[in-house]
Amino acid sequence: YPWGIEAMVYCMEHFPDAGFGLMAQDYHKNLSFPFCLSPKEAYADFYFRGKLIGMGPTGAIIKREAFEAVKGFSGTQYIGDTEMWYRLAAKWPLVCMPAQLVWWREHGEQQIKGEIKNNTIKSSRYQLMIDALQHPECPLSKADTEMAMGNVKNLFARNILIGLMSGKIKGSLELMRLTKLSMPDILRSFKRNKYPAKTR
């Protein structure tokens, strides 16, 4: 929208130390926009809420200094934007901006459509989530990192289990092989995910 960039710049100017901003979803209703998350808070949001990390580049604004410091997007297809959010959020605060600043047109040629049926892409996203947690710059505590790691494994293990139960044997076993999840991982996914005592 014509006012979208102006609103994004307005939000970023409120937090000069921030490295980037993402449009936030409606689960932040109890907070007034814009607001800022520290690296630790941003990672907790990514792993224990899960919606903010899914924002695409259309709903993002990046400070040039931060963009150049991480050498820009890697160019990795399908997961390059998510990869960038992890890299930026590990180093700089993240500004949460109100939704509806842009118009997102849905169509059949979008990459997100291809990911739904492609196990190689799914496994790449899984590995990205694990790698971000194992990176030396991960801002989460050791306990929260282990908790998040277990939740990520549960998420993908449940998808495999649902596939097996719905008769999609070949595809489910392929995803299991690509993610290197074991049968004990699949069985552990019956347990509920764990969350920190306080998740903003």
Image: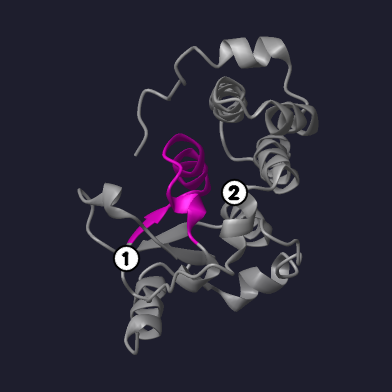
107 is within the stretch colored magenta = no
* Magenta-tinted stretch: 35-55
Relative to 148, say whether 92 is above or below.
below
188 or 171: nearer the eye?
171
Expressed as whole percent of the image width and height from the top left, the position of residue 121 reads 71, 48
Q: Can you identify the residue that label 1 sits on?
A: 99
Q: CA distance from mark 2 to mark 1?
A: 24 Å
Tell me which label, 2 or 1, sits earlier in the chain. Answer: 1
Image quadrant in which the C terminus is located: top left
Expressed as whole percent of the image width and height from the top left, the position of residue 145 reads 59, 28
Q: Residues within 10 Å of mark 2 (few under 14, many from 20)?
A: few
31 or 164: nearer the eye?
164
Q: Is residue 179 left or right of residue 195?
A: right
Q: Is residue 88 visible?
A: no
- The colour style of the image is one colour
Three-letter amino acid code at the position of disc 2:
Ile
Q: Can you identify the residue that label 2 sits on?
A: 116
94 or 47: nearer the eye?
47
